[in-house]
Image: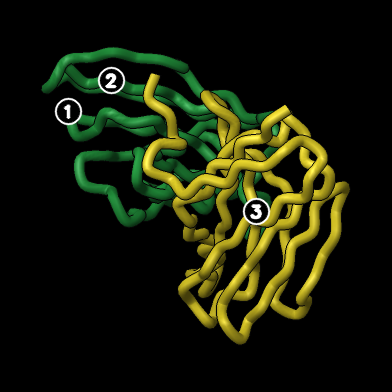
Chain colours: A yellow, B green
Amino acid sequence: GESVGLHLPTLSVQEGDNSIINCAYSNSASDYFIWYKQESGKGPQFIIDIRSNMDKRQGQRVTVLLNKTVKHLSLQIAATQPGDSAVYFCAENSDSGGSNYKLTFGKGTLLTVNP
Amino acid sequence: DAGITQSPRHKVTETGTPVTLRCHQTENHRYMYWYRQDPGHGLRLIHYSYGVKDTDKGEVSDGYSVSRSKTEDFLLTLESATSSQTSVYFCAISGGSDTQYFGPGTRLTVL
């Protein structure tokens, strides 16, 4: 069936290498960012988040870096595994006025891990 | 996907027919969202709810309506389906922070 991965930027890495996926966000007023992973045929899965009062946050094998000066977000995956193959996309709370809690999503990057 | 189910998971329908998609959550979260996902686009917000009977439009709300009569259920209705509404639909929930958690999706095909 048709995949969400069509028409997306792609990153191909060897198993065991580190991966870096980048995202440029649009709204300088955004103060919260999330990275999601989406495997084929599944819903987006929360990976890690970061608030704008931080520039780095680490999870298990993943690190998110935030550069507010250039409105850039990156996701680093250490020792990439075949199970990491998926579409990764970032989201920002570009409209969090009041109690809306709405997110704006990037189009994503398709990560392929070669064994 | 824990705590969020969507039904049906797959549906094929004909142009002009009404379609209702259901999102059910067991997390007692206040906020619920409906998105559509299409190739070449990021997730786009259709409608969202910030409480029982409290809903608002998103960026692509034309042709869609929603209802939320209980905390746990958020329904998306296509009053008269069109081929442009062929898509994968995701429900998401949030407990009042910015973090949203997604359901497994419904693949809808309108012939």
What secondary structure is found at the residue carrying circle 3? Answer: strand
Relative placement, left or right, of B59 versus A57 is left
**Residues packed near mark 3 inside 10 Å, few (<14), some (14 to 19) or many (20 plus):** many
**Residues packed near mark 1 inside 10 Å, few (<14), some (14 to 19) or many (20 plus):** some
Circle 3/circle 2 CB separation < 8 Å: no
| Quadrant of the snapshot with the C terminus of chain B | top left
Residue in view at x 48 percent, y 76 percent: A27
Q: Which residue is mark 2?
A: B109
Residue in view at x 37 percent, y 33 percent: B76
Q: Nearer the viewer, mark 3 or mark 2?
A: 3
Circle 1/circle 3 CB separation < 8 Å: no
Chain holding disc 1: B
Q: Which residue is mark 3?
A: A35
What secondary structure is found at the residue carrying circle 2? Answer: strand
Q: Is residue A68 above or below residue B14?
A: below
Query: How far is disc 3 from disc 2 in space, using C-alphas?
Result: 29 Å
Along the line of sight, the residue nearer the viewer: A50 or A100: A50
Q: Position of residue A41 (x, y in %)?
A: 52, 24
Amino acid found under the numbered disc labelled 1: Ser
Relative placement, left or right, of A47 versus B14 is right
Q: Are marks 1 and 3 on the same chain?
A: no
Q: Nearer the viewer, mark 1 or mark 3?
A: 3
Amino acid found under the numbered disc labelled 2: Thr
Q: Position of residue A88 (x, y in %)?
A: 59, 46
Q: Are marks 3 and 2 on the same chain?
A: no
Along the line of sight, the residue nearer the viewer: B111 or B53: B111
Relative placement, left or right, of A43 versus A95 is right
Using the rendered view, name the quadrant where residue A71 is placed. Answer: bottom right
Q: Which residue is mark 1?
A: B83
Residue B102 visible here: no
Q: Is residue A98 above or below residue B43?
A: below
